[in-house]
Amino acid sequence: MVTQDLSPYGANADRPVPGMAKLKRQVSRLRVALVVVLVLLVVVGVWAVIGVTTLSSTVSSLETKVDKLQSETSAQAAGGGTTASGGGAAAPKQTIAAATSLPDGTPMPVGVDGAGAVLVGDPNASNVVEVFIDYQCPFCQQWEAQIGAPLMAKALQPGSNVLVKQYNLAFLKEANRDLTPPGASARAASAAACVIDGGSAQVFVAFDSALFASADPSEPPSQFQNDVLAALARDAGAGPETIACIEETRYVPFASAVTKAAFARGVTGTPTVLVNGRLVESSFSDPELLALAQG
């Protein structure tokens, strides 16, 4: 009896389909390639994470070192050879070169000399005190309260025979020496230049004192906004043109030039003080400086 195979594949069900073996080999190779690609992606991802973490750690470490160096430099200059913790370590010897004129093309406010110092007192005085400050410097704030304010008041008295030359630097927490974009120190220094440009030495001294008194010792980049500076200037007696100057930060290029010139002379921190050309070892306790401020 003859029967018909009704299965789906008939009698040839066990025979290999032509090309099937080749197809299986190709699929196998694709699987291997896919596994290799996945492994490479995992390895690259792991190394990327490690690289980013390492770079972030390095940047953080460098920022910490820079902030510490700035703090120690300011402390040494302010304390006449003491560290911020008062440990008594000797400060490096400084040599401050003579002042030179600022570069041609620098916008110069009225009331400053060719080197960019704000002049307060008798221009013909035999006693000349040069002071380098940054309005964000906490040691400068202390110096202003103890020495700077009475020294300025003395210089303003008729017949005092004292001339104060104040260089308003801008470097703490600034992005660069060009002060672009201007930070808190740059805005404050520019405003001080606006005040001396548009007013008298008396108005500048009042603004200078108020500015130091309002400063946050933690040096936040957000302080000394233009509206705050304008209000302080207005209270000190500044007029509308001075307020406009402050609001447009007109003298940031001047502050940058003064800062660069100061560091070129050998200034390494603030406050740095010279009395009749002599760099004082301690700007808080120098006998000659104290006599000038209190005499």
Image (spheres, rainbow, N blue to C red):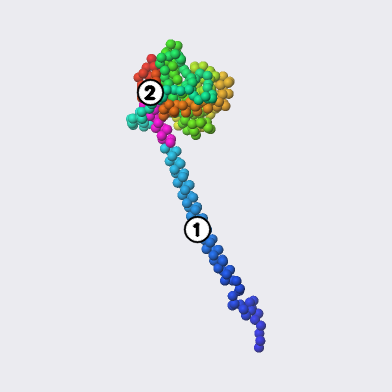
| Magenta stretch contains residue 18 | no
Kindly identify which residue carries mark 1: 39
How many residues crowd around disc 2 within 10 Å: few (fewer than 14), some, or many (20 or more)?
some
| Magenta stretch contains residue 69 | yes
How many residues crowd around disc 1 within 10 Å: few (fewer than 14), some, or many (20 or more)?
few
Q: Residue at x 61, y 77 (%)?
A: 13
Q: For the magenta stretch, what is the residue range?
A: 66-80
Q: Is any atom of residue 211 visible in this view?
A: no
Q: Position of residue 249 (x, y in %)?
A: 55, 27
Q: Residue at x 50, y 25 (%)?
A: 103
Nearer-the-camera pick, 214 or 101: 101
Q: Position of residue 70 (x, y in %)?
A: 42, 33
Farthest-out residue, bottom: 1
Q: Secondary structure at mark 1?
A: helix
Q: Is any atom of residue 241 visible in this view?
A: yes
Q: Position of residue 171 (x, y in %)?
A: 47, 30
In the rendered view of the protein, which quadrant contains the N terminus?
Answer: bottom right
Kindly identify which residue carries mark 2: 279
> Looking at the magenta stretch, what is its main secondary structure?
helix
Q: Which callout, 1 or 2, points to the residue nearer the camera?
A: 2
Q: Residue at x 33, y 31 (%)?
A: 89
- The alpha-carbon separation of the residues under discs 1 and 2 comes to 66 Å
